[in-house]
Amino acid sequence: MTQGQYVAAAYGAVFVFVLVYVAIIAAKLARLQRETAELLELARSRERLDRVPDYAAPVRGSREGATGTE
Amino acid sequence: MGLALVLALIVVAEDQDQGVSQRIFYIHVPIALTAYFCFGLGAWKALLLLWRGEERYDLESYVAIHQGTIFGALTLITGSIWAKASWGHWWLWSENQLVLFLVLFLFYCAYFMLRFSLEEGSRRARSSAVYALFGVVLIPVSFLAIRLAENLIHPTVFTREGPQMSGSMFATFCIAWAAVTLLAYVLYRVELAGKRLDADLRELREVLQ
């Protein structure tokens, strides 16, 4: 190997290391983004489930009351 | 970083003694100094954890040591390539400064083994912090070994009389050092933000499920 090739190898090694590191970070960020979306969906479904009983209870009660008077 | 690369590889004059292989100096030395700085920062954060007991310092110490290990590995790789180009050997076990840097690097590699062998919690944080503090003792030893070495195969550029290089070489070195430090800082912030986000999401998942 020539001296110039050694220089290229040294700078290339640093470049490859940084590139691999950035790729790992990018993959991790993508995973975090996916997990955030999953949790958001989970929170929304929870919110929908929590709303149903609050809404249903008075309706059921008013219907029963209505049938009772008839 | 781009400016540093252009200056180091194209603009700055070739060294009369070592020739073109001396250009590795502009990447090897800044990376080595950044590795020392990261290990020192990790130890400082570990000290803060033990002193103040704030949990966030554990993650900051871990990320700094992780960065130091990455830059340490790069120091060994670029140093070996430079050694082969200049001295004709990839590695010399007789050179104290090389072996001491390898010891420092392996010591901090073992930090991860210790950390991941313990369960998450305050015990792990404190054990890791104490280990990180022990390692900081090796930094001045490794740094001074380059100056105290008897056979002086490893070049000593910065002496008491100042840097032993021309003004343009020194300016290139300073720009390269600033670029590598900035790169390390950005990587540190990104990794730290990722780890914090990961921890927050794990906690949020536990709350929701």
Image (tube, coloured by chain):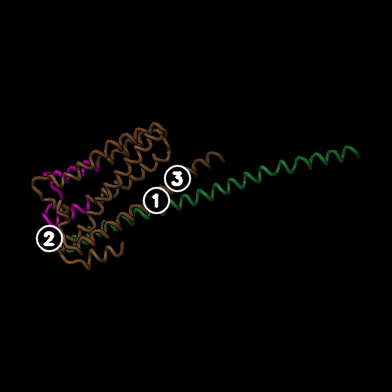
Chain colours: A green, B brown
Q: Which residue is mark 1?
A: B189
* Residue drawn at (39%, 49%) of the image: B191
Q: Which residue is mark 2?
A: B18
Give the x, y percent position of residue B184.
Answer: 33, 52
Amino acid under disc 2: Gln
Amino acid under disc 1: Arg
Residue B84 is inside the magenta segment: yes
Name the element at disc 2. loop
Characterize the local packing of mark 1: few (<14), some (14-19) or many (20 or more) Cα atoms within 10 angstroms. some
Q: Residue furthest left?
A: B151
Instruction: Please state, as top left, top right, bottom left or bottom right, where the N terminus of chain B lies in the image.
Output: bottom left
Identify the subunit bearing mark 1. B
Name the element at disc 3. helix
* Residue drawn at (42%, 33%) of the image: B121
Give the x, y percent position of residue B153.
Answer: 10, 50
Q: Which residue is mark 3?
A: B196
Q: Circles 3 and 1: CB distance less than 8 Å?
A: no
Q: Earlier in the sequence, mark 2 or mark 1?
A: 2
Q: Is residue A25 left or right of residue B8?
A: right
Give the x, y percent position of residue B79.
Answer: 19, 52
Q: Is residue B130 left or right of residue A65?
A: left
The boundaries of the magenta stretch are: B76-105
* Residue drawn at (33%, 42%) of the image: B42
Identify the subunit bearing mark 3. B
